[in-house]
Image (tube, rainbow, N blue to C red):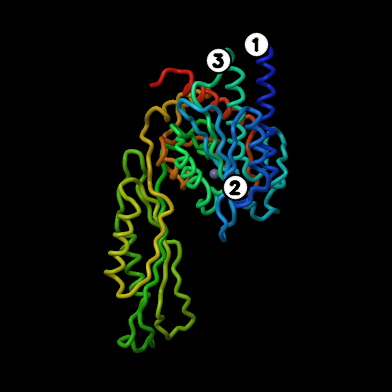
Amino acid sequence: MSLSVQERGKERVVAEFDIVELARDLIRCPSVTPTDAGALDVLQKALERLGFICYRLPFGLGDEGKVDNLYARLGTEGRNFCYAGHTDVVPPGYIGDWSHAPFDGSMEDGVIYGRGASDMKGAIAAFVGAIERFQTQFLTGLTKIPGSISLLITGDEEGVAVNGTKKVLNWLTARNETIDHCLVGEPTNPERIGDTIKIGRRGSLNAQITIKGVQGHVAYPDGADNPVSRLVKFLAALEDHPLDTGTENFQPSNLEITSVDIGNEATNVIPARASARFNIRFNDCHDGASLRRWISGLCKSYAKEFDLDITVSGEAFLTPPGELSNIVSGAIAKITGMSPKLSTSGGTSDARFIKDMCPVVEFGLISRTMHKADECVATADLKLLSEIYLAVLEQYFLMPRQ
Ligand SMILES: [Zn+2]
């Protein structure tokens, strides 16, 4: 059925109204990782109304708890454009710090308050609204979208992320399904919608070292081996070593010592052990394996005996500026007149897993209140983001490829 201009106008008002209500409905589900609290049901219902085939993919039974995930697809052929994100949220923290209850979805002066408003339930609602308008306004006369739109939504992004996006991608691979391009809806804009697209992320490495010495009396150091002296020299060597000076797309890698733990209550005892922890956010000059080799080599030169525990939670990655970032930048320019910065700053996100399957960039709401008390989103920003997402779909599916 084709819609008249006037009817299309009405449709547009309804769709915009729905975005706000969908965001509020999602916020009302207290989906603190790994709990789903009905959030994926709310989203699935909205997507099924638009014709999506939905798959619920619960993973994990262990200590970290079962995690529910959703993969939804509209269309079966052509290029598959995926929107990825998460419905889980971080805990609200001290409730007294909130001026509006974190899970009420309350609204005041055109601002929706609640945990997940910006990170990233609001953005998911904006994308659903964009699909609805894409179907009703741009596909009149076409029988179907020339390709496929999918959503990959996890309930395990803010937590350990082992039963979320990574396992959904494995599930896709096992059924010979692929994603061609992916937009992750994390809040990327520091101040205004259109500021920043993320085209990569730094990697992250956490290390814990315990240096073992020989306990003894401080007055008789010859019979002891002080692990604190060794640890201090090791940490100084870590900090003195310049990792790199940055690359074309990345800021310099950074190492931060986060804790030094001796726990020695006596003033006259050389302790037997000394521990420290540090984190490295690294760019594409390094990978987890090269940093691991460097750290353990350094340990060996400062300590005779030590325990070293290193975890790499994500490698650095980059989707080089190209078709996908051009489409998103073009959509932002069309709607806001701004030309966004292509950035690789900030923490990790699930894009670190998706990059193994296809080009991925991130663009969402304003990041200012994420993970804070009174997390919020202006309804005007939700609508603006939805306009941009709509322009992305239009460019991706209806314009000639670049
Ligand atoms: Zn997030």
Point out the tag, 3 or 2, that comes first from the N-terminus.
Answer: 2
Quadrant assignment for ligand 1: top right
Q: Is residue 45 visible?
A: yes
The amino acid type, in three-letter code, at marker 3 is Leu
Residue at the image point whose x is 66% and y is 29% from the top:
49
Disc 2 + disc 1, Cβ < 8 Å? no
At numbered mark 2, what does the secondary structure look like: helix, strand or loop?
loop
User: Residue 368 has which mark?
Assistant: none
At numbered mark 1, what does the secondary structure look like: helix, strand or loop?
helix
| 109, 386: nearer the viewer | 386
Residue at the image point whose x is 66% and y is 26% from the top:
16
At numbered mark 3, what does the secondary structure look like: helix, strand or loop?
loop
Task: Please tell me whether mark 1 or mark 3 is closer to you in this view.
Answer: 3
- Residue 290's place in the image compared with 392, above or below, is below
The amino acid type, in three-letter code, at marker 2 is Asp
Point out the tag, 1 or 3, that comes first from the N-terminus.
Answer: 1
The residues bearing labels 2 and 1 have C-alpha atoms spaced at a distance of 41 Å
Q: Position of residue 118 (x, y in %)?
A: 59, 40
The residues bearing labels 3 and 2 have C-alpha atoms spaced at a distance of 35 Å
User: Residue 5 has which mark?
Assistant: 1
Q: Residue under circle 2?
A: 68
Q: Position of residue 362 (x, y in %)?
A: 48, 37
Disc 3 + disc 2, Cβ < 8 Å? no
Point out the tag, 2 or 1, that comes first from the N-terminus.
Answer: 1
Q: Residue under circle 3?
A: 142
Q: Is residue 190 visible?
A: no
Q: Position of residue 81 (x, y in %)?
A: 48, 30
Q: Is disc 2 surrounded by few (<14), some (14 to 19) or many (20+) residues within 10 Å?
A: many
The residues bearing labels 1 and 3 have C-alpha atoms spaced at a distance of 17 Å
